[in-house]
Image (cartoon, rainbow, N blue to C red):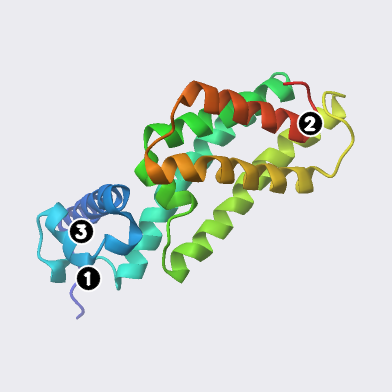
Amino acid sequence: MAYRKTPTEMRRLEAAREHLVVCATEVVADVGWAQASVTAVADAAGIAAGSVYQHFSSKSALAVEVFRRAAQREVDVLGEVLEREGDPADRLRRGVEVFARRALENHGLAYALLAAPAEPAVGAERLAFRRRYRALFASVIDEGVAADRFPGQDAEITAAALTGAIGEVLVYPLSTSAAGDADLLVAGLTAVALRCAGAAP
């Protein structure tokens, strides 16, 4: 008869896995993907390096889990803002503002999510999540067109351009930890977003 873990053991393993992911996320935010070795993560979690492989088959699998969780939080926050009721232009401005401020407040993790060099598995996840950002922006742009707040346009193209522009504007200040005047940067970025969609800033 095959051994089955008890509910207590399952809860303990899940708690240990969660702790490992939290520690790995902190390491990535501090040193980036390249330096977030299994040993570094294990040290942060207070476990032996070999114990990491009880929860993840490889460093790549752990990195993908870290990326997915952190990126999904940002998608969820952006979606919450963009999907509210109200004027589409106001929601677009507010969504870009919230996204940018969250990135600037946690620049290490934001840079890791947006642009830091990473292994191919993380790069593939990055592309998948960019599509999610684009879908959120396209939806609110479509609403704005329907409400005559934005001129007629291909919302998918505008959303793709907007997603790329946001990342490009943020990547340098995030990579250098030198955002300068964050309020000025955010104001400029939201103005660009509104112009991209065809609304007055």
Q: Residue 53 bears which disc, if any?
A: 1
* Mark 3 or 2, closer to the camera: 3
Q: Residue 41 bears which disc, if any?
A: 3
Disc 2 residue type? Glu
Q: Nearer the viewer, residue 90 or 56?
A: 90
Disc 3/disc 2 C-alpha distance (Å): 44 Å
Disc 1 residue type? Tyr
Does the rendering let one see residue 53? Answer: yes
* Mark 1 or 3, closer to the camera: 3
Q: Give x and y (percent) for residue 60.
A: 36, 69
SS under mark 2 = helix
Q: Which residue is mark 2?
A: 143
Q: Is residue 81 above or below residue 126?
A: above
Judge the density around disc 2: few (<14), some (14-19), many (≥20) Cα neighbours within 10 Å: some
Q: Residue at x 59, y 31 (%)?
A: 96
Disc 3 residue type? Val
Q: Is residue 44 above or below residue 61?
A: above
Disc 1/disc 3 C-alpha distance (Å): 12 Å
